[in-house]
Image (cartoon, rainbow, N blue to C red):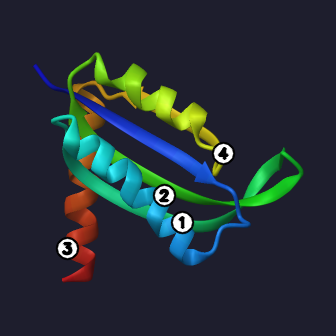
Amino acid sequence: MLKHYETVFIMTPVLSEEQAKETVSKYKKLLTDNGCKIVTENAWGLRKLQYPIQKKTTGFYHLFEFQAPPTFVAELEVAYKRDERLLRFLTVALDKHAVAYSLKSRNKAKAVVA
């Protein structure tokens, strides 16, 4: 059974745009290769950090919402920890209310664009 998850990671700001895209595609490939279904993907871009991390005050944020087997999250976080390009990451399991809210907000965003 697949569970809903949301993961966001912050990449170091010293990466070029191409390196940032490469990092995102690496994790997207990791998700799809392990049988995960990507529900939505959102690049938040370069943002100011609340407090400095490794003497950096900004970072590139990226979010994935996906469905995966519960055992996969540990493997994903090990990959995050090994990557020097990432400053921080957070993966959370979504309950039915969070999934409904996410779906509602995506539909609202589509309605605004259309």
Specify which label sits upstream in the sequence, 3 or 1. 1
The residue labelled by disc 4 is: 84
Instruction: Identify the element where label 3 is drawn.
Output: helix
The residue labelled by disc 2 is: 23
Neighbours of disc 1 within 10 Å: few (<14), some (14-19), many (20+): many
Specify which label sits upstream in the sequence, 4 or 1. 1
Type of the residue with mark 1? Ala
Type of the residue with mark 2? Thr
- Residue 20 — which label? 1
Residue 14 location, x and y as percent?
73, 67
Residue 86 location, x and y as percent?
62, 47
78 left or right, relative to 106 = right
CA separation in Å, label 4 and label 1: 12 Å
CA separation in Å, label 3 and label 1: 29 Å
Mark 3 in CB contact with mark 4 (< 8 angstroms): no
Q: Who is closer to the viewer here, 113 or 9? A: 9
Mark 2 in CB contact with mark 4 (< 8 angstroms): no
